[in-house]
Image (spheres, rainbow, N blue to C red):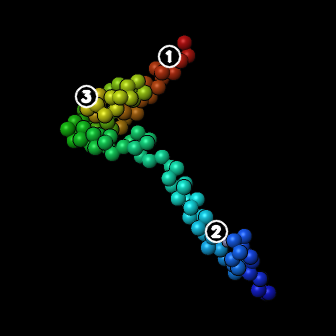
């Protein structure tokens, strides 16, 4: 098999066949860094460290589901974040729920919302 000749990169570098020029590798790294920076952080998505701390704290103090009394895994907003985003971190706006009650409540809420939009 004949050895392919090295190619000449746009930057003037002679690059062995099949290899990447250092300038291309650097461009790749820069693109990746930009991509990582563009990704929204956890706090930007509304799940910041303050919420996680509050949530853990609330579950520690209220370990039982407030609907059925089983062990709670979820912390729910009594007034939904959609309606009162400023009460997202208000400890008096939180309730502990078990996973089935939490998903049940959310589904009911969405059905109500759906009805409201149908009219
Ligand atoms: Zn190059
Ligand atoms: Zn429950």
Residues under labels 3 and 1: Cα distance? 27 Å
Residue 10 in view of the camera: yes
Residue placed most toward the observer, 81 or 68: 81
Count of number-bearing discs: 3
Label 3: which residue? 92
Q: Is mark 1 within 8 Å of ligand 2?
A: no
Residues under labels 2 and 3: Cα distance? 55 Å
Q: Position of residue 40 (x, y in %)?
A: 48, 46
Q: Are marks 2 and 3 in contact (CB under 8 Å)?
A: no
| Position of residue 110 in the picture relative to residue 118 (left or right) | left
Picture residue at 60% right of the left edge, 69% below the top = 25
Q: Secondary structure at mark 3?
A: helix
Label 2: which residue? 24
Q: Secondary structure at mark 2?
A: helix
Residue 14 placement: quadrant: bottom right
Q: Secondary structure at mark 1?
A: helix
Residue placed most toward the observer, 70 or 5: 5
Residues under labels 1 and 2: Cα distance? 55 Å
Label 1: which residue? 116
Between marks 2 and 3 in the image, the one whose residue lies nearer the viewer? 2
Tell me if residue 5 comes above or below residue 62 in the rendering: below
Q: From the image, which quarter does the N terminus lie in?
A: bottom right
Q: Are marks 3 and 1 in contact (CB under 8 Å)?
A: no
Q: From the image, which quarter does the C terminus lie in?
A: top right
Residue placed most toward the observer, 114 or 55: 55
| Position of residue 87 in the picture relative to residue 41 (left or right) | left
Q: Earlier in the sequence, mark 2 or mark 3?
A: 2
């Amino acid at each position: 098999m004949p050895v392919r000749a090295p190619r000449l990169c746009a930057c003037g570098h002679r690059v062995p066949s099949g290899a990447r020029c250092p300038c291309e590798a650097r461009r790749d790294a820069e693109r990746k860094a930009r991509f990582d920076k563009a990704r929204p952080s956890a706090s930007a998505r509304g799940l910041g460290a303050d919420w996680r701390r509050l949530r853990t704290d609330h579950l520690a103090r209220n370990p039982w589901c407030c609907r059925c009394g089983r062990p709670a895994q979820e912390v729910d907003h009594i007034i939904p974040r959609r309606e009162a985003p400023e009460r997202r971190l208000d400890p008096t706006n939180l309730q502990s729920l078990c996973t089935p009650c939490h998903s049940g409540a959310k589904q009911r809420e969405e059905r109500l919302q759906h009805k409201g939009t149908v009219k």
